[in-house]
Amino acid sequence: DVKVTQSSRYLVKRTGEKVFLECVQDMDHENMFWYRQDPGLGLRLIYFSYDVKMKEKGDIPEGYSVSREKKERFSLILESASTNQTSMYLCASSFNEQFFGPGTRLTVL
Amino acid sequence: GEDVEQSLFLSVREGDSSVINCTYTDSSSTYLYWYKQEPGAGLQLLTYIFSNMDMKQDQRLTVLLNKKDKHLSLRIADTQTGDSAIYFCAVFLSGGYQKVTFGIGTKLQVIP
Protein backbone atom coordinates (compact mmCIF):
# COMPACT_ATOMS: atom_id res chain seq x y z
CA ASP A 1 0.00 0.00 0.00
CA VAL A 2 1.43 3.34 -1.05
CA LYS A 3 2.31 5.70 1.72
CA VAL A 4 3.22 9.35 2.08
CA THR A 5 3.74 10.49 5.64
CA GLN A 6 4.19 13.94 7.10
CA SER A 7 5.99 14.54 10.36
CA SER A 8 3.20 16.42 12.15
CA ARG A 9 -0.56 16.74 11.75
CA TYR A 10 -0.72 19.97 13.74
CA LEU A 11 2.00 22.50 14.47
CA VAL A 12 1.97 25.84 16.27
CA LYS A 13 4.94 28.18 15.89
CA ARG A 14 5.76 31.80 16.66
CA THR A 15 6.54 34.54 14.17
CA GLY A 16 10.22 34.50 13.23
CA GLU A 17 10.82 30.87 14.10
CA LYS A 18 12.46 28.52 11.61
CA VAL A 19 10.05 25.71 10.78
CA PHE A 20 10.76 22.32 9.22
CA LEU A 21 8.02 20.22 7.66
CA GLU A 22 9.10 16.71 6.75
CA CYS A 23 7.63 14.38 4.17
CA VAL A 24 8.58 10.77 3.52
CA GLN A 25 7.36 8.43 0.78
CA ASP A 26 7.94 4.71 0.46
CA MET A 27 7.13 4.28 -3.23
CA ASP A 28 10.57 5.07 -4.67
CA HIS A 29 9.05 8.02 -6.55
CA GLU A 30 11.40 10.52 -8.09
CA ASN A 31 8.92 13.41 -8.02
CA MET A 32 7.84 15.08 -4.81
CA PHE A 33 5.80 18.22 -4.21
CA TRP A 34 4.83 20.69 -1.52
CA TYR A 35 1.52 22.54 -1.68
CA ARG A 36 -0.34 24.84 0.61
CA GLN A 37 -4.10 24.78 0.77
CA ASP A 38 -6.12 27.82 1.80
CA PRO A 39 -9.89 28.38 1.78
CA GLY A 40 -11.06 29.76 -1.54
CA LEU A 41 -7.63 29.36 -3.14
CA GLY A 42 -7.38 25.59 -3.57
CA LEU A 43 -3.95 24.00 -3.78
CA ARG A 44 -0.98 26.13 -4.68
CA LEU A 45 2.37 24.61 -5.55
CA ILE A 46 5.27 25.89 -3.46
CA TYR A 47 8.19 23.77 -4.63
CA PHE A 48 8.76 20.45 -6.29
CA SER A 49 11.67 18.10 -6.80
CA TYR A 50 12.25 15.60 -9.57
CA ASP A 51 15.40 14.03 -8.20
CA VAL A 52 17.68 14.00 -5.19
CA LYS A 53 19.24 17.42 -4.64
CA MET A 54 17.13 18.88 -7.44
CA LYS A 55 14.40 21.43 -6.82
CA GLU A 56 12.17 23.71 -8.83
CA LYS A 57 10.10 26.69 -7.74
CA GLY A 58 6.39 26.33 -7.96
CA ASP A 59 3.87 29.14 -8.09
CA ILE A 60 4.44 30.62 -4.62
CA PRO A 61 8.01 29.89 -3.44
CA GLU A 62 8.58 33.17 -1.59
CA GLY A 63 9.37 32.66 2.08
CA TYR A 64 10.05 28.95 1.64
CA SER A 65 12.96 26.70 0.80
CA VAL A 66 13.26 22.94 0.37
CA SER A 67 15.73 20.15 0.82
CA ARG A 68 15.92 16.77 -0.90
CA GLU A 69 18.99 14.93 0.40
CA LYS A 70 17.48 11.47 0.02
CA LYS A 71 15.02 10.18 -2.53
CA GLU A 72 12.35 9.31 -0.01
CA ARG A 73 12.44 12.56 1.96
CA PHE A 74 11.44 16.08 0.93
CA SER A 75 11.56 18.84 3.51
CA LEU A 76 9.87 22.23 3.41
CA ILE A 77 11.57 24.99 5.38
CA LEU A 78 10.09 28.26 6.52
CA GLU A 79 13.19 30.35 7.21
CA SER A 80 11.34 32.91 9.34
CA ALA A 81 7.71 32.00 9.85
CA SER A 82 5.11 34.72 9.40
CA THR A 83 1.41 34.79 10.21
CA ASN A 84 0.48 34.69 6.52
CA GLN A 85 2.09 31.26 6.35
CA THR A 86 -0.63 29.84 8.57
CA SER A 87 -2.10 27.17 6.33
CA MET A 88 -2.57 23.48 5.59
CA TYR A 89 0.57 22.06 3.98
CA LEU A 90 0.27 19.02 1.77
CA CYS A 91 3.09 16.86 0.48
CA ALA A 92 2.74 14.58 -2.53
CA SER A 93 4.87 12.18 -4.53
CA SER A 94 4.28 10.81 -7.98
CA PHE A 95 5.18 8.58 -10.81
CA ASN A 96 2.06 9.47 -12.80
CA GLU A 97 -0.75 10.35 -10.42
CA GLN A 98 0.14 12.18 -7.23
CA PHE A 99 -0.23 10.50 -3.86
CA PHE A 100 -0.78 12.82 -0.94
CA GLY A 101 0.16 12.79 2.68
CA PRO A 102 -2.42 13.61 5.39
CA GLY A 103 -1.35 17.24 5.64
CA THR A 104 0.15 19.44 8.35
CA ARG A 105 -1.97 22.26 9.71
CA LEU A 106 0.49 24.99 10.66
CA THR A 107 -0.51 27.94 12.78
CA VAL A 108 1.92 30.84 13.12
CA LEU A 109 1.17 33.13 16.05
CA GLY B 1 -0.15 28.18 -17.97
CA GLU B 2 -2.97 25.73 -17.44
CA ASP B 3 -6.14 27.00 -15.82
CA VAL B 4 -8.60 24.61 -14.16
CA GLU B 5 -11.99 25.84 -12.98
CA GLN B 6 -14.67 24.29 -10.82
CA SER B 7 -17.73 25.55 -9.04
CA LEU B 8 -17.26 25.95 -5.30
CA PHE B 9 -20.28 24.18 -3.90
CA LEU B 10 -22.84 21.48 -4.70
CA SER B 11 -25.66 20.23 -2.53
CA VAL B 12 -27.61 17.02 -3.25
CA ARG B 13 -30.01 14.75 -1.42
CA GLU B 14 -28.92 11.31 -0.32
CA GLY B 15 -29.70 8.75 -3.03
CA ASP B 16 -29.63 11.30 -5.87
CA SER B 17 -26.84 11.56 -8.43
CA SER B 18 -24.17 14.25 -8.07
CA VAL B 19 -22.43 15.80 -11.03
CA ILE B 20 -19.30 17.83 -10.43
CA ASN B 21 -17.99 19.79 -13.39
CA CYS B 22 -14.55 21.05 -14.35
CA THR B 23 -13.17 23.02 -17.28
CA TYR B 24 -9.55 23.38 -18.29
CA THR B 25 -7.68 25.41 -20.85
CA ASP B 26 -4.79 23.39 -22.24
CA SER B 27 -5.82 20.95 -24.95
CA SER B 28 -2.55 19.01 -24.64
CA SER B 29 -3.54 17.68 -21.21
CA THR B 30 -2.86 13.95 -21.08
CA TYR B 31 -4.19 12.71 -17.75
CA LEU B 32 -7.15 14.15 -15.91
CA TYR B 33 -7.82 13.23 -12.29
CA TRP B 34 -10.45 13.47 -9.64
CA TYR B 35 -9.34 13.63 -6.03
CA LYS B 36 -11.45 13.54 -2.89
CA GLN B 37 -10.56 15.32 0.35
CA GLU B 38 -12.42 14.52 3.53
CA PRO B 39 -12.33 16.99 6.43
CA GLY B 40 -8.89 17.27 8.02
CA ALA B 41 -7.31 14.80 5.61
CA GLY B 42 -5.05 14.83 2.57
CA LEU B 43 -6.23 14.23 -0.99
CA GLN B 44 -7.16 10.74 -2.09
CA LEU B 45 -7.11 9.80 -5.77
CA LEU B 46 -10.61 8.69 -6.78
CA THR B 47 -10.25 8.05 -10.46
CA TYR B 48 -8.55 9.31 -13.59
CA ILE B 49 -9.05 9.32 -17.32
CA PHE B 50 -6.62 9.45 -20.22
CA SER B 51 -7.15 12.18 -22.77
CA ASN B 52 -7.81 9.61 -25.51
CA MET B 53 -10.89 8.34 -23.65
CA ASP B 54 -14.40 9.81 -23.54
CA MET B 55 -15.76 7.97 -20.56
CA LYS B 56 -14.64 5.82 -17.68
CA GLN B 57 -16.88 4.03 -15.21
CA ASP B 58 -15.80 2.66 -11.85
CA GLN B 59 -18.64 1.38 -9.66
CA ARG B 60 -20.67 4.45 -8.64
CA LEU B 61 -18.30 6.85 -10.38
CA THR B 62 -18.56 7.91 -14.02
CA VAL B 63 -16.06 10.29 -15.57
CA LEU B 64 -16.95 12.04 -18.82
CA LEU B 65 -14.44 13.93 -20.92
CA ASN B 66 -15.39 16.32 -23.70
CA LYS B 67 -12.09 17.26 -25.29
CA LYS B 68 -13.62 19.67 -27.75
CA ASP B 69 -15.12 21.77 -24.96
CA LYS B 70 -12.27 20.97 -22.51
CA HIS B 71 -14.85 19.82 -20.01
CA LEU B 72 -14.52 17.05 -17.45
CA SER B 73 -17.26 15.80 -15.16
CA LEU B 74 -17.56 13.36 -12.28
CA ARG B 75 -20.91 11.71 -11.68
CA ILE B 76 -21.53 9.93 -8.40
CA ALA B 77 -24.55 7.65 -8.53
CA ASP B 78 -26.68 7.02 -5.44
CA THR B 79 -24.83 9.67 -3.43
CA GLN B 80 -24.30 8.80 0.22
CA THR B 81 -23.54 10.97 3.26
CA GLY B 82 -20.03 9.49 3.22
CA ASP B 83 -19.49 11.16 -0.15
CA SER B 84 -19.59 14.58 1.52
CA ALA B 85 -16.14 16.01 0.85
CA ILE B 86 -14.23 18.42 -1.37
CA TYR B 87 -13.60 17.11 -4.88
CA PHE B 88 -10.63 18.38 -6.86
CA CYS B 89 -10.24 18.20 -10.59
CA ALA B 90 -6.57 17.99 -11.65
CA VAL B 91 -4.90 18.08 -15.03
CA PHE B 92 -1.50 16.76 -16.04
CA LEU B 93 0.35 18.03 -19.08
CA SER B 94 2.81 15.85 -20.93
CA GLY B 95 6.44 16.89 -20.67
CA GLY B 96 7.87 18.87 -17.83
CA TYR B 97 8.33 17.36 -14.41
CA GLN B 98 5.00 15.76 -13.62
CA LYS B 99 3.40 19.03 -12.63
CA VAL B 100 -0.30 18.83 -12.09
CA THR B 101 -2.66 21.80 -12.02
CA PHE B 102 -5.53 21.55 -9.53
CA GLY B 103 -8.90 23.20 -9.57
CA ILE B 104 -10.07 25.08 -6.51
CA GLY B 105 -12.21 22.18 -5.31
CA THR B 106 -15.98 21.63 -5.19
CA LYS B 107 -17.49 21.07 -1.77
CA LEU B 108 -20.18 18.41 -2.01
CA GLN B 109 -22.79 18.47 0.72
CA VAL B 110 -25.09 15.44 0.93
CA ILE B 111 -28.37 16.07 2.72
CA PRO B 112 -29.83 13.03 4.47
Image (tube, coloured by chain):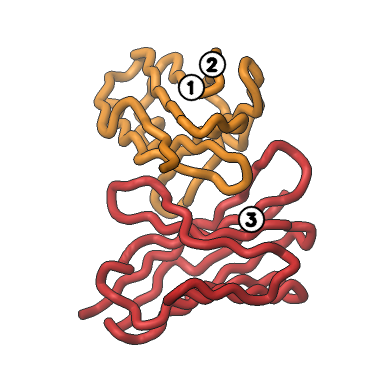
Chain colours: A orange, B red
For label 3, the residue is B91
Q: Residue furthest front?
A: A1
Q: Judging from the image, what secondary structure is the residue with disc 3 in?
A: strand
Name the residue: 46% across, 30% down.
A25
Check the picture and name the quadrant holding the C terminus of chain B.
Answer: bottom left
**Apparent side of residue A74 relative to residue A103 in the rendered image (left or right):** right
What amino acid is at disc 1?
Arg
Q: Quadrant of residue A29?
A: top right
Which residue is disc 1 drawn over?
A73
Q: Label 3 lies in what chain? A: B
Give A86 or B100, whichever is nearer the viewer: B100
Vertical arrangement, residue A16 with respect to residue A85, above or below: above
Identify the element where label 1 is drawn.
strand
- The residue to which callout 2 is attached is A70
On the image, the x and y values in percent for residue A26 come to: 46, 30
Checking the image for residue B89, the label placed there is none
Closest to the observer: A82 or B51?
Answer: B51
- Looking at numbered disc 3 in the image, what kind of residue is underneath it? Val
Seen in the image, is B71 located left or right of residue B43? right
Q: Is residue B79 above or below residue A44?
A: below
C-alpha gap between disc 2 and disc 3: 28 Å
The total of numbered circles placed on residues is 3
Answer whether labels 2 and 1 touch (C-beta < 8 Å). yes
Mark 2 residue type: Lys
